Amino acid sequence: KEQQLRLRAESAESQYRAILESISEGFVFMDRNWRIQYANTVWARFAGMAAGEFLGAELWTAFPGLEDTRFGAAYRESMETGRPLQVEDYFEPLTRWFRVNIYPSADGLSIFAQDVTEQRIQRERLLISEKLAATGRLAATIAHEINNPLEAVLNLVYLARTSRAQ
């Protein structure tokens, strides 16, 4: 009976790991002492490390400078309050934008991370494009508003010239 329970637990753990390896988000779980207990390959790729390279390491040691970022503050807040949080910010050491969802539990924190750098770049480009289009529309409106009185003046000048000639 005990053997069956152990086998079922190992099978369930294997299934959970397979699921976490198949998702497109980076995933990391750390215990209440900030020690990394599991990280999937996407998380490792984000960090530029091998998948098992930082297992057992303290989060703040594995990622120097993280503690003083919005991510570090959110991790601490979530661990202390027990509330899930979401943060999107630029992480300078990796020169990327990340959106992280933080889920606390009695055992520690589960963190799902998405690299949203390309989305941010596209959003910036769209914003610049919209600003340029608005500037173009404003310039066209101003040109039209200036052109109408200018046409009237030119017509009067023409009439004045032609009427003197007669």
Image (spheres, helix red, strand yellow):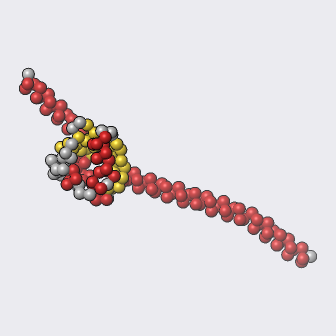
Q: Residue at x 67, y 62 (%)?
A: 142
* Residue placed most toward the observer, 29 or 77: 77
* Residue placed most toward the observer, 20 or 100: 100
Q: How many marks?
A: 0
Relative image position of residue 17 (x, y in whole percent): 20, 38
Instruction: Say whether residue 160 is visible.
Output: yes
Q: Residue at x 31, y 54 (%)?
A: 69
**Left or right of residue 56, residue 45 in this image:** right
Instruction: Say whether residue 24 is visible.
Output: no
Relative image position of residue 26 (x, y in whole percent): 27, 46
Q: Quadrant of residue 109?
A: top left
Residue 12 in the image: above or below residue 96: above
**Left or right of residue 107, residue 142 in this image:** right
Name the residue at the right extreme: 166
Q: Residue at x 48, y 54 (%)?
A: 126
Name the residue at the bottom extreme: 165
Q: Quadrant of the N terminus?
A: top left
